[in-house]
Amino acid sequence: MNYNEIAQQVKKDSFRMATLQESVRNNTLQAIANALTEKKEEIFEANEADLADAKANQLAAPIINRLKFDEHKLSDILSGIDSLISLPDPLFHTLLERELDEGLTLIKTTCPIGVIGVIFESRPDALIQISTLCIKSGNCSILKGGSEAARTNKALFTIIKDAGISCGLPEGFITLVENRAGIDELIKCHESIDLLIPRGSNEFVQYIMANSKIPVMGHADGICHVYVDQSAELSKAIPIILDAKTQYVAACNTLETLLVHADVAASLLPSLKDALASKNVLVKGCDQTQQLISCEPATEQDFKTEYLDYILSIKVVHTIQDAIEHINKYGSHHTDSIITEDDSAAAEFMNFVDSASVYQNCSTRFADGFRYGFGAEVGISTGKLHARGPVGLDGLVTYKYKLFGNGHIVADYAEGKKSFHFKEK
Amino acid sequence: MNYNEIAQQVKKDSFRMATLQESVRNNTLQAIANALTEKKEEIFEANEADLADAKANQLAAPIINRLKFDEHKLSDILSGIDSLISLPDPLFHTLLERELDEGLTLIKTTCPIGVIGVIFESRPDALIQISTLCIKSGNCSILKGGSEAARTNKALFTIIKDAGISCGLPEGFITLVENRAGIDELIKCHESIDLLIPRGSNEFVQYIMANSKIPVMGHADGICHVYVDQSAELSKAIPIILDAKTQYVAACNTLETLLVHADVAASLLPSLKDALASKNVLVKGCDQTQQLISCEPATEQDFKTEYLDYILSIKVVHTIQDAIEHINKYGSHHTDSIITEDDSAAAEFMNFVDSASVYQNCSTRFADGFRYGFGAEVGISTGKLHARGPVGLDGLVTYKYKLFGNGHIVADYAEGKKSFHFKEK
């Protein structure tokens, strides 16, 4: 079977997946947790083979770090599954129940999206997080992981698939795509796949968006800002900037451009420069920044760049409105933070900055499903439709309208013989 | 200014529009209702000129009917605005308030989508419905109406714009695109326009979807089904089928293919044939249908066709599963109805048919924002993301996450110095 045929089969199975009761889905999650524990040696063995290859291929240290799947990662994963089991069921919620007229009742009820294709990076724990979120929300998942984690992913997939089948899930509840070419087949399956969630580089996500008719959820880049307002407490500003820039430099919620109000630039920038230097952060500054500290010049291109590296561009602004305008123009609508003790300035910033997450006095690195208390996330959406910001269970369901009648026809209402009374139930 | 510059300006105004209090938005709606009443003669005059042109150009009677804007339409519109004013505010709802840790509070709050581009057909009342829905939901709208209604639309636009400005709305809250070429400029404004809602022919909607990076909400076609189950009461079936097919033949929620269980085909089809003939409906049938009534043959192409005409294709099926499979394969995920007295068959149909609206014992023509009690609609979505089915105020808002801290950094949590406690507020 090619992936088009596989996706069609998964689509059919998705309707059965959508009707599974909460107990079946939760039992499956528990069975997966048990099987991962019982078969952990198989996983660690596969992972060691992947790690050996990665080292032989001289992959970068951060990739090797993310690739590692050990007791510590397993224990995180197991506690994640535990908390997922305890989260309320996202399915079969009645969002609206309205009697339109005598004997004609409209019910709006939550249901799964259907078939979700997820393409993710090297972390094998992502495979477990994504597939368990999909199971809890009644969706079938088609997964493509990073090739450097191929053996680990295959081991995890086999364990999850076996556990699911033994709990009564349909065959197509999970599918692993094992070759890179599969991606190009998958993104053409717009009749079978309801949603694509690509996680990866800007270019990769843009490629998926440009080449598929399937709706895409996620983000291409994360150009996040911190704005230090004239009413900022500088003792808070410096640790927040350091954390946002350096706590994990390759993340999408990492700070890329710092905006500083002119009134505090002279007092902030020299000590900030030293603090950044201690973390080996290269600073690029606008003209005014260069007058206050020695640094490379920042061009307009810098303000459009997601460095994902130890580089920070700095711009001095003269009003909060200038800061907001800069962020809305150059940002990626991901996560932006204002440092200020003035709550009305914070309110203005948070209302006018057009981003999924807007913060006061904290690091942009908090933008994450786990840190928001969602248990886990399938990704972070910078789109405004359906789901925005870190996407957990809520973003994996949609709804349908059910209308129950007794021979009701529209002509009676159009001709004035009957009229709607709209009673909420 | 070209439309790209206009859209950029509207985008800026959209942030101010997003912060307007409910009272300002409701006062504006009242001012619009008052102005429409005061200036109704201007509107009727413009409409008569449009109607005269339409007649001179020999446009079809249904188009001329939809184009008409008279006292009767005005009174409908005014009562629609009244009910819109009385609907609860969709903005500034707190969807979640969670203390992540001491002094670190996450708030998920509803907000407008931003700038919405709507391209709609000949009915000038659509301009008022769409723009007032956008005002209530704090969105700026950019509207392109049918050219045959150009004078009426211009008159309505001027009245609405003047009323809005006098109530303190930003200049860009409403924009009218007056030439067809404007559409091609607009769909390129993906940096300024957040959502496109095209209403029109299948080809037109497909064109917009294929040529814009802006998310599109709506539907390309409406291939709706009625399935007459073996447990159907035939006295209900025939009026529902007639209503679904003929009550308004050019609507997206009109019946195109009838599926009939083999056990009831012989008792239903002959009398149905007579009833359809009385409404001048041409019947195309599968082999089994042709054995029971005289009709043209239905090909596979028929099952993929949205006739928007007095034509009905009929297929005999042997199980409810066959009916569901046919609908999921050939339908457009819009609205499908089962006629049955067997509630478990209805439940199976309604759970497994992958459509926005699924009905038992009533006409597909009920799929409409007004009939669902939403006051009005901006369109009907067959997509599963964000909004599904008739789209009212709920579909015009999104949310953002606001996080309030006091110098909080992620390193403290990553290094185990602090941990999240996730307290709901």
Image (cartoon, coloured by chain):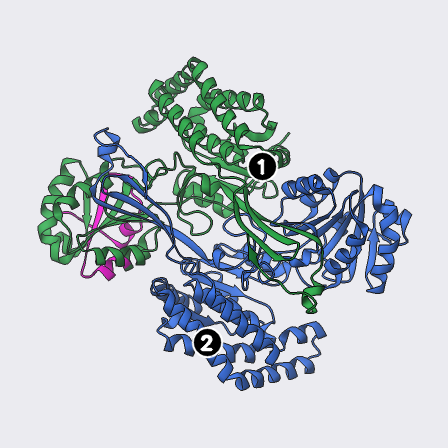
Chain colours: A green, B blue
Residue B366 lies left or right of residue B419; in this view the side is right
Q: Where residue B317 appears, x then y in whole percent?
A: 79, 42
Q: Where residue B357 appears, x then y in whole percent?
A: 62, 51
Q: Residues within 10 Å of mark 1 (few under 14, many from 20)?
A: many
Q: Is residue A162 highlighted in magenta?
A: no
Q: Is residue B70 visible?
A: no
> In the rendered image, which quarter contains the C terminus of chain B?
top left
* In front of the other: A156 or B2: A156
Is residue A67 depicted above or below B344 in this figure?
A: above
Q: Residues within 10 Å of mark 2 (few under 14, many from 20)?
A: many
Q: Which mark is residue B32?
A: 2
Q: Which mark is residue A18?
A: 1
Residue B109 lies left or right of residue B287; in this view the side is left
Q: Where residue A375 appears, x then y in whole percent?
A: 39, 34
> In the rendered image, which quarter contains the N terminus of chain B?
bottom left
* In front of the other: B57 or B82: B82
The subunit letter for the residue under badge 1 reads A
Magenta region, residue range: A295-324
Q: Assign a secondary structure to mark 2.
A: helix
Q: Are marks 2 and 1 on the same chain?
A: no
Is residue B414 depicted above or below B146 in this figure?
A: above
Give the CA separation, mark 2 to mark 1.
45 Å
The subunit letter for the residue under badge 2 reads B
Which quarter of the figure has residue B75? bottom right
Circle 2: residue type: Ile
